[in-house]
Image: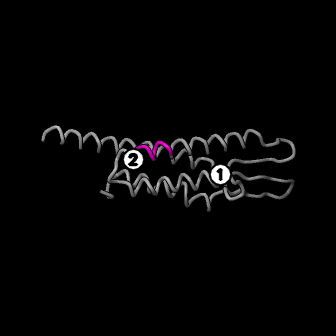
Amino acid sequence: MIQRIQTLYLAICFIASGVLPFFVSIWTEKNGEETQAVYFTESTTAMVLFGLSALLAVISIFSFKKRQNQFVLNRLNIISNFILLGFFVYRTLNLSGEAVVSEKGIGITLPAISIVLLVLANRAIKKDEDLVKSVDRLR
């Protein structure tokens, strides 16, 4: 049943964590007159966590027959996105304020968008599971 709404949420989550980081900057550093956009590929931690999030979303999309496993994979994905969000907060709070001026980019919100989409997917999976259990009761 790949045509469920949770598949749409998970596909958008995959796009937000697997495709968009290549195109949007995480933050912008300004050294004197020169402005440089920082992408996720410049940080090994961000690269690994974005890759893990995208991989878990794809695995979760294709495990539609096992709703409980899909639910658990989404929970793991939420945890990895919280770790990624914490890394970004830590990184932005520890930037040196005098030598380098920094601006946050739109890429820093991608883990939060993914978390919201994963929560919506988990709600839809739970609703499907409850529906299946109610039908089983009637048999």
Q: What residue type is labelled 2?
A: Asn
Tell me: residue 97, above or below residue 52: above
In the rendered image, which quarter contains the N terminus?
A: bottom left
Which quarter of the figure has residue 8?
bottom left
Query: Is 70 contained in the magenta span?
Result: yes
Q: Is residue 85 left or right of residue 28?
A: left
Q: Residue 54 versus residue 99: which sits nearer the camera? A: 54
Q: Give the residue drawn at x 59%, y 53%.
A: 50
Q: Residue 106 versus residue 110: which sits nearer the camera? A: 110
Q: In this view, does 38 lie to the left or right of 130?
A: right
Tell me: residue 28, above or below residue 19: above
Q: Which type of secondary structure does the marked residue at label 1 adopt?
A: helix
Mark 1–mark 2 Cα distance, whole angstroms, equals 25 Å
Q: Where residue 78 sits in the image (x, y, percent)?
A: 51, 43
Task: Identify the residue under disc 1.
Answer: 46
Q: What residue type is labelled 1?
A: Ala
Q: In this view, does 32 lie to the left or right of 23?
A: right
Q: Give the residue drawn at x 63%, y 48%.
A: 108
| First along the sequence among labels 1 and 2 | 1
In the rendered image, which quarter contains the C terminus?
A: top left
Task: Identify the residue under disc 2.
Answer: 69
